[in-house]
Image (spheres, helix red, strand yellow):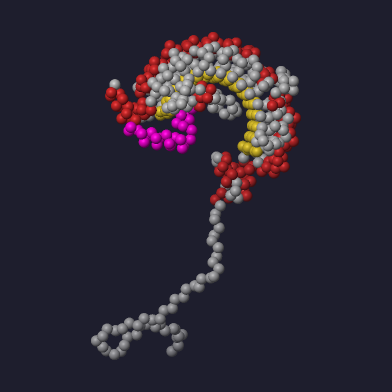
């Protein structure tokens, strides 16, 4: 018989052969288990995955455009790719334009090669960049469309000429506290055919009329849409620019010396499409207002501290400019604009949406017509008016059905007149009352409780408060800043669509709410006792 291969014996449990009454005992086999010995040096963890590595550069740049500037700066520190893409895709840039910036210009604009909106600002106590630096920047940014220069005192007319030659696509220029004159602005107007907005403030080069001749009358700025002149000693050297801009829409003149009636007369002949005019602290009279009446497209008018303007000029303007939507008048308590002018506005301007009266003394006679005929009136502000009392506010509450925001400051109104707001003005959402001695905090709280959806901002006059200082209330009234800044006096008076009505900062708003809730029960009970006793 053939032999089979030997096989290993498997060890089974053994039983004893001796018979016994005891139960068989089970003997466990020997089992050996081995574990791997851990190595002393552990392997490194897998690297983190960069999910943005598969995104195209264009997509990542779009993401950067959606971030605020602070977040973009943080993103540029993540990796070299982000650093490069963030710089190449940045279009807005603001630089400290000190003289030391000259050495860093090549490196900066190698990284930020797509800048189209640039702001150069220098501390007034430091030396700014000069013509050479501005020329280098202009050559590095041929696609520049917006430029803001602040306190660049070393820049001259030659530097502005170099800028104009290298940046023909410039659309918006804002200069302030610089030392060049009208020749520099003229060079930009000649070379930049797409210039739409021009803002000139406090140019030192205009202090001498001989050194700053008027801009050539040969220049016709067909693309210019908005001009802002502020605090210029010889600002009339730009009169030809304004009158030779046939497509001009916005004109803002703030605190500029000289007689401006002739310019307004030229505008009435050459520039008929003007829609917005701001005049503040100017030598302008009824003659200028009558000239503006030839602009039928006028929609926004600001007359701030122009004492030579009276009811006569305003009446003529209102009769012909029937599209007026916003009117701000600061009468400077001269009593030269009153019921007559407001009655003309009420009769001829049915599209009026916003009316701000400061230092003007209207009565119920004119306000009733405004409330009746101007059915679209949504924002109304009266400050420092000696005749706006309980009868006038009762008229407003009964007639202004579309009114949404109301501001009253330094007027002789009382709780009795304010009570009409509890049921009047059904669309009213915000009320601001400041320095009105006849209105009590108890009533303000009662009004707040009566109309739960109404935001009431109440500022009680202090024990030392006298008559309200109108100049302090609306200092810098109107938009006297850059043309990019669209703030108006109404926003400073609490008529803006934001949170200006409810206070300045979050902390102040929080404190106001805490004080309101802390004393609410006292206010309500005190007001009830007061009316109960009567």
Where does residue 4 sit, x and y in percent of width and height? 45, 86
Residue located 70% across and 36% down the image: 127
Q: Magenta segment, which residues? A: 496-522
Residue located 66% across and 32% down the image: 151
Residue located 40% across and 22% down the image: 438
Q: Quadrant of residue 212?
A: top right
Where does residue 434 sit, x and y in percent of width and height? 44, 25
Q: Is residue 255 visible?
A: yes
Q: Which SS type dominates the magenta stretch? A: helix
- For residue 142, side relative to residue 280 (left or right): right
Q: Residue furthest left?
A: 21
Name the quadrant of the N terminus: bottom left
> 28 or 402, which lies in front?
402
Count of labels shown?
A: 0
> 501 or 72, which lies in front?
501
Residue located 30% across and 23% down the image: 531
**In the displayed structure, would residue 282 be above or below residue 441?**
above
Q: Quadrant of residue 279?
A: top right
Where does residue 446 sit, x and y in percent of width and height? 35, 27
Q: Is residue 66 magenta?
A: no
Where does residue 315 sit, x and y in percent of width and height? 52, 10
**In the displayed structure, would residue 100 be above or below residue 34?**
above
Q: Is residue 520 magenta?
A: yes
- For residue 345, side relative to residue 182 (left or right): left
């Amino acid at each position: 018989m053939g032999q089979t291969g030997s096989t290993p014996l498997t060890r089974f449990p053994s039983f004893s052969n001796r018979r016994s009454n005891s139960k068989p005992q089970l003997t466990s086999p020997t089992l050996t288990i081995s574990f791997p010995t851990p190595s002393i040096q552990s392997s490194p963890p897998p690297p983190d995955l960069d999910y943005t590595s598969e995104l195209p550069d264009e997509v990542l740049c779009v993401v950067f455009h959606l971030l605020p500037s602070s977040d973009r700066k943080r993103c540029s520190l993540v990796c070299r790719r982000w650093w490069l893409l963030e710089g190449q895709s940045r279009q807005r840039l603001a630089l400290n334009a000190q003289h030391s910036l000259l050495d860093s210009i090549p490196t900066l604009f190698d990284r930020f090669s797509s800048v189209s909106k640039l702001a150069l600002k220098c501390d007034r106590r430091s030396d700014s960049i000069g013509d050479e630096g501005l020329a280098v920047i202009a050559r590095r940014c041929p696609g520049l469309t917006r430029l803001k220069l602040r306190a660049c005192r070393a820049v001259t007319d030659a530097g502005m000429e170099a800028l104009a030659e290298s940046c023909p696509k410039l659309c918006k220029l804002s200069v302030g506290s610089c030392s060049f004159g009208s020749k520099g602005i003229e060079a930009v107007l000649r070379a930049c055919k797409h210039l739409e907005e021009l803002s000139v403030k406090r140019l030192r080069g205009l202090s001498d009329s001989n050194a700053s001749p008027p801009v050539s009358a040969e220049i016709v700025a067909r693309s210019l849409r908005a001009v802002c002149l502020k605090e210029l000693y010889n600002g009339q050297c730009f009169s030809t620019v304004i009158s030779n801009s046939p497509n001009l829409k916005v004109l803002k003149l703030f605190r500029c010396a000289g007689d401006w009636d002739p310019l307004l007369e030229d505008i009435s002949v050459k520039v008929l499409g003007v829609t917005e005019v701001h005049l503040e602290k100017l030598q302008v009279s009824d003659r200028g207002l009558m000239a503006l009446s030839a602009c039928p497209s006028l929609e926004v008018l600001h007359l701030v501290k122009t004492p030579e303007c009276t009811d006569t000029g305003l009446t003529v303007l209102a009769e012909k400019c029937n599209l007026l939507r916003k009117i701000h008048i600061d009468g400077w308590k001269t009593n030269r604009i009153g019921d007559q002018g407001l009655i003309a506005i009420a009769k001829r301007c049915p599209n009026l949406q916003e009316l701000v009266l400061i230092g003007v003394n209207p009565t119920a006679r004119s306000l009733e017509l405004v409330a009746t005929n101007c059915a679209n009136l949504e924002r109304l502000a009266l400050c420092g008016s000696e005749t706006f009392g309980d009868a006038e506010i009762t008229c407003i509450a009964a007639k202004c059905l579309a009114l949404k925001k109301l501001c009253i400051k330094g007027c002789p109104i009382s709780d009795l007149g304010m009570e009409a707001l509890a049921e009047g003005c059904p669309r009213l959402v915000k009320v601001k009352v400041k320095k009105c001695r006849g209105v009590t905090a108890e009533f303000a709280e009662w009004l707040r409780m009566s109309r739960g959806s109404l935001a009431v901002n109440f500022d009680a006059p202090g024990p030392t408060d006298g008559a309200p200082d109108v100049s302090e209330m609306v200092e810098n009234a109107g938009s006297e800043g850059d043309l990019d800044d669209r703030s108006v006096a109404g926003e400073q008076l609490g008529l803006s669509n934001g949170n200006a009505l409810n206070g300045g900062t979050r902390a102040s708003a929080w404190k106001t709410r805490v004080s309101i809730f802390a004393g609410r029960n006292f206010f309500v009970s005190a007001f009830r006792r007061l009316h109960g006793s009567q």
